[in-house]
């Protein structure tokens, strides 16, 4: 009973006070609870894919948003995870439960390697150079079809578990773990260092931060998460094909990331949860089937014109304000800060306006 | 085979140079990484196809009209889509990606996904060094050379060119010297897309036209521009020659070369970047703060 009351107090004081945290809580409940309420095979499939791509988008944001290493070839890590896991389980007959982690490990290695090669590159050079890596690998895969399956890829992979709902829960829990893990990491001291590297690498180095080491670590972490997503994807659709390395996938993750708002982790995840089911839903209409990508692009463009910083920061600014004194966030409806009881900015602005009218 | 490599390499380099120099110009002046650049090239090819086969205009008239139309469209896109989000680099980036996707899907809706062939604008071949070169490919070379010369003239012999170079060099100072930076950026967009459109028109009769024809040259163009150094004209030209020939050699001399040509070209780009992170002719600028 005491524990229950304690938990309720925590919930009320830490989560329900802020609309953004309440939203996150609702989202977690929805992700875990929706399949129990709405048990449709097609919806479940879409949700599973959404979760996989959410991991992928969050990993891109860690690298591009926080550290400023805008990666145009993020599909490389996805594909490395998918192909490694696929090949291992196909050729050696290992259980997918093992090979998924092997795929993630391989992607970590690839991430570290790409990071190592790109250490000296900055800005647009880095973006355009990273675009090249998945295409180089793709060319090699096509040139040696005996090993990679060529255009068809490696098919007939086993799923992790038998029923769709079990698979969904495996993917969803992993997604929640990875997303919250990355979020924690990004909010920690480590994340602050990453912000510093993005904003001014020279100044960060001058402050005694070993920037190459941090960049390599982020490349490896981001690669690991993306590789895990790729491996899960391969075992879910049961094919590890060249589509996991294509430019389209790399661009897709960039669109998700920027649409949702970079350097937030939750932004890209929110973008995936909105955009992926939406495009799939559009595809179910006969009339829209062919226009799917067109509508998707137009919507992305329009949203960007109104919210150039991305969806999540825009929404957050609408529902929350910063306390001018202690910099803590508050619900937009509050008159005084919930922690230091300083008058909030909106309130100050209104007071000033009143003074002006007199 | 040697002659084949020489000729194919030269023709491809010409097309790549047209694309890469345009891209490089926009990047230099407006700092826009224009992913939709080759989509304009694709649009021009489609426009040329439509005018030629549906309206019965002559080759020259449809070519000029399609270049003009695509250029006008690019200026419109710049004003409506890019300019409102200019301060947000990331937003500009995905705006151009979205534009490219929109053009691709529009063409898919209007013309369908199948390959379209355009009758050759010039028939006949000329024999040089024992290889027969169709006049069409020769035309590509001539047009590319003429356009490069024209761009050089504009950039180095006119006041507009001076303004473009000044803006590319230092946007803020150019602004303070009384240049209308927005107008200069718009002019640059027009010039660079016109180059891409011209490339699309001359290439259309040789290659097939389909809605996805912009993706392969996009990657090659990016490789060339990065190889030569972002924003450098000379670098783009030399990069185009290098990549054009490397691709030709891979296709003709290596087994399974058609699959590997992109990979080899990109690997060369990565190799150059490892040695010189700013590309062959890029200026090693201290990062802007």
Image: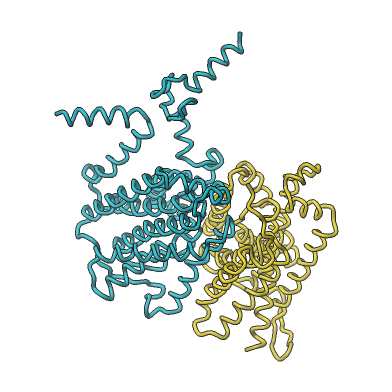
Residue found at the very far left of the displayed protein:
A1
Task: Give the colour scheme shown.
Answer: by chain
Residue found at the very far top of the displayed protein:
A358
Vertical comparison of B48 with A140: above or below: above
Residue A126 in view, yes or no? yes
Which residue lies at the image location 61% right of the left edge and 13% below the top edge?
A: A356
Q: Which quadrant holds residue B273?
A: bottom right
Q: How many marks?
A: 0
Vertical comparison of A155 with A177: above or below: below
**Residue B86: where, in percent of width, then height?**
63, 44
Chain A's colour is cyan
Which residue lies at the image location 69% right of the left edge and 60% below the top edge?
A: B283
Give the camera-side residue of A103 and A187: A187
Give the camera-side residue of A198 and B29: A198
A252 sits to left or right of B198: left
Chain B's colour is yellow
Quadrant (top left, top right, bottom left, bottom right) of the N terminus of chain A: top left
**Residue A70: where, in percent of width, then height?**
52, 54
Quadrant (top left, top right, bottom left, bottom right) of the C terminus of chain A: top right
Residue B52 in view, yes or no? no
Which residue lies at the image location 36% right of the left edge and 44% below the top edge?
A: A184
**Residue A203: where, in percent of width, then height?**
57, 48
**Residue B161: where, in percent of width, then height?**
80, 55
Which residue lies at the image location 44% right of the left edge and 65% below the top edge?
A: A245
Q: Which quadrant holds residue B115?
A: bottom right
């Amino acid at each position: 009973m005491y524990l229950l009351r304690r938990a309720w107090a925590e919930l009320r004081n830490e989560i329900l006070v802020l609309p953004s945290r309440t939203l996150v809580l609702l989202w977690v409940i929805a992700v875990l609870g929706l399949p129990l309420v709405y048990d449709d095979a097609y919806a479940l499939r879409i949700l599973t894919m959404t979760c996989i791509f959410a991991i992928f988008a969050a990993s891109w944001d860690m690298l591009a948003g926080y550290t400023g290493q805008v990666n145009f070839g993020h599909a490389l890590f996805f594909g490395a995870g998918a192909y490694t896991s696929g090949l291992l389980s196909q050729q050696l007959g290992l259980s997918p439960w093992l090979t998924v982690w092997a795929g993630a490990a391989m992607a970590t290695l690839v991430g570290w390697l790409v990071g190592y090669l790109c250490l000296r590159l900055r800005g647009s050079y880095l973006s355009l150079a990273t675009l090249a890596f998945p295409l180089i690998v793709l060319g090699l895969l096509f040139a040696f079809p005996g090993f990679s399956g060529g255009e068809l890829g490696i098919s007939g992979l086993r799923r992790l578990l038998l029923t769709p709902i079990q698979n969904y829960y495996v993917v969803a829990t992993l997604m929640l773990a990875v997303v919250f893990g990355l979020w924690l990491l990004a909010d920690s001291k480590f994340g602050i260092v990453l912000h510093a590297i993005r904003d001014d690498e020279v100044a960060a180095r001058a402050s005694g931060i070993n920037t190459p080491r941090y960049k390599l670590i982020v490349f490896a972490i981001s690669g690991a998460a993306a590789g895990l997503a790729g491996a899960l994807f391969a075992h879910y659709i049961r094919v590890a094909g060249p589509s996991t390395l294509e430019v389209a996938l790399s661009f897709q993750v960039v669109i998700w990331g920027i649409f949702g708002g970079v350097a937030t982790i939750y932004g890209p995840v929110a973008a995936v949860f909105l955009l992926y089911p939406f495009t799939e839903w559009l595809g179910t209409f006969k009339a829209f089937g062919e226009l799917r990508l067109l509508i998707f692009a137009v919507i992305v463009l329009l949203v960007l014109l109104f919210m150039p910083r991305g969806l999540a920061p825009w929404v957050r600014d609408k529902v929350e304000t910063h306390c001018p004194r202690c910099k803590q966030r508050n619900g937009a409806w509050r008159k005084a800060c919930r922690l230091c009881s300083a008058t909030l900015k909106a309130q100050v602005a209104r007071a000033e306006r009143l003074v002006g009218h007199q | 085979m040697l002659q084949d490599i020489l000729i194919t390499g030269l023709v491809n380099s010409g097309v790549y140079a047209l694309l890469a120099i345009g891209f490089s110009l926009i990047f230099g002046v407006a700092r826009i990484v224009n992913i939709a650049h080759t989509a304009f090239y694709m649009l021009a090819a489609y426009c040329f196809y439509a005018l030629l086969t549906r309206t019965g205009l002559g080759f020259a008239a449809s070519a000029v009209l399609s270049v003009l139309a695509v250029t006008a469209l690019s200026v419109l896109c710049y004003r409506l889509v890019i300019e409102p989000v200019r301060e947000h680099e990331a937003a500009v980036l995905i705006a151009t990606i979205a534009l490219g996707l929109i053009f691709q899907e529009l063409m898919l809706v209007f013309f369908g996904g199948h390959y379209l062939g355009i009758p050759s604008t010039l028939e006949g071949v000329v024999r040089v060094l024992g290889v027969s070169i169709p006049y069409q490919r020769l035309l590509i070379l001539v047009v590319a050379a003429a356009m490069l010369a024209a761009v050089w003239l504009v950039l180095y012999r006119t006041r507009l060119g001076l303004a473009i170079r000044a803006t590319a060099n230092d946007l803020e100072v150019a602004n303070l010297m009384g240049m209308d930076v927005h107008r200069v950026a718009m002019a640059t967009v027009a010039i660079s897309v016109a180059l891409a459109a011209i490339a699309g028109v001359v290439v259309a009769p040789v290659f097939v036209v389909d809605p996805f024809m912009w993706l392969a040259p996009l990657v090659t163009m990016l490789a060339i521009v990065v190889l030569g150094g972002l924003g450098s004209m000379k670098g783009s030209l030399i990069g185009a020659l290098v990549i054009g020939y490397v691709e030709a050699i891979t296709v003709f001399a290596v087994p399974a070369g058609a699959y590997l040509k992109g990979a080899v070209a990109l690997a060369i780009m990565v190799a150059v970047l490892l040695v010189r992170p700013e590309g062959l002719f890029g200026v090693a600028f201290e990062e802007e703060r």
